[in-house]
Image (cartoon, rainbow, N blue to C red):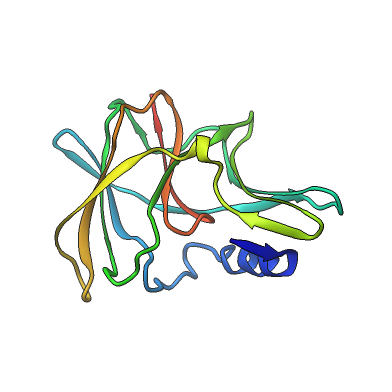
Amino acid sequence: MRISVLSLATLVLAGSLSAQQQVYAPGDLQRVLLVSGTQSIQMRDMVASRQGSWAVVVSKQFYVFKGPKATLRTGTTLPEFEFETDPAFDDPVYLFRFSVNSDSREIRVAKGTGGLAQLSIPKDRIIETGVQEIGTGQNSTKRYRLRPMAPLPPGEYCLGRRISICYDFGVD
């Protein structure tokens, strides 16, 4: 998908509301749990700040999350996630790995030239997953379970549908 710089800026502003101001939209993930063995932990959504370089030749856009490590940690390399969402909304749910800096975690979400940028997560950051429906949720939603297809190496990760809103966690 190709979008203009103005459209990307609008997308960034729409995704920059604080978690307290958010109202769940159709397709948003709701009641997200990290399941590790017999323990289920309620996950919190984090909202990214925007950082980028805009030039006529090459533009890059990053979503940046504060801190080098997520507060939520797991020792399992094959965590499972359960969440509710509107079954009519078929956008993918992403599990991706952050790049880590000394004071933040980030993911490049757009790269382009000549004023146009393609909005996408780099393929080498996306973790292959399997999703299965496991029941009925609240308010006409369905409940799903998502699992990585291979063990996750230690690092910082995010589960999300809209790239700017993330359920972050770390694997130790």
Task: Please tell me which residue is depicted at 73% across the width and 52% down the height of the picture.
Answer: 112
Side (left or right) of 103 relative to 157? right
Instruction: From the top left corner, tell me how far across and down residue 135 is, in percent.
Output: 12, 61
Instruction: From the top left corner, tell me how far across and down residue 162 is, in percent.
Output: 48, 59
Q: Quadrant of the N terminus?
A: bottom right
Side (left or right) of 168 relative to 117? left
Task: Please tell me which residue is depicted at 37% across the width and 68% down the height of the picture.
Answer: 27
The number of numbered discs placed on residues in the rendered structure image is: 0
Side (left or right) of 147 relative to 124? left
Residue 68 position by quadrant: top right
- Where is 77 relative to 128, above or below? above
**Pick the front one: 84 or 16:** 84
Residue 66 position by quadrant: top right
State the residue lying farthest toward the bottom.
Answer: 139
**Pick the front one: 49 or 88:** 88
State the residue lying farthest toward the right.
Answer: 56
**Pick the front one: 91 or 50:** 91
Side (left or right) of 87 relative to 29? left
Instruction: From the top left corner, tell me how far across and down residue 34 is, in percent.
Output: 28, 43
Q: Quadrant of the C terminus?
A: top left
**Pick the front one: 160 or 33:** 160
- Where is 37 relative to 110, above or below? above
Instruction: From the top left corner, tell me how far across and down residue 21 is, in percent.
Output: 49, 70
Task: Please tell me which residue is depicted at 40% across the width and 23% down the height of the picture.
Answer: 153
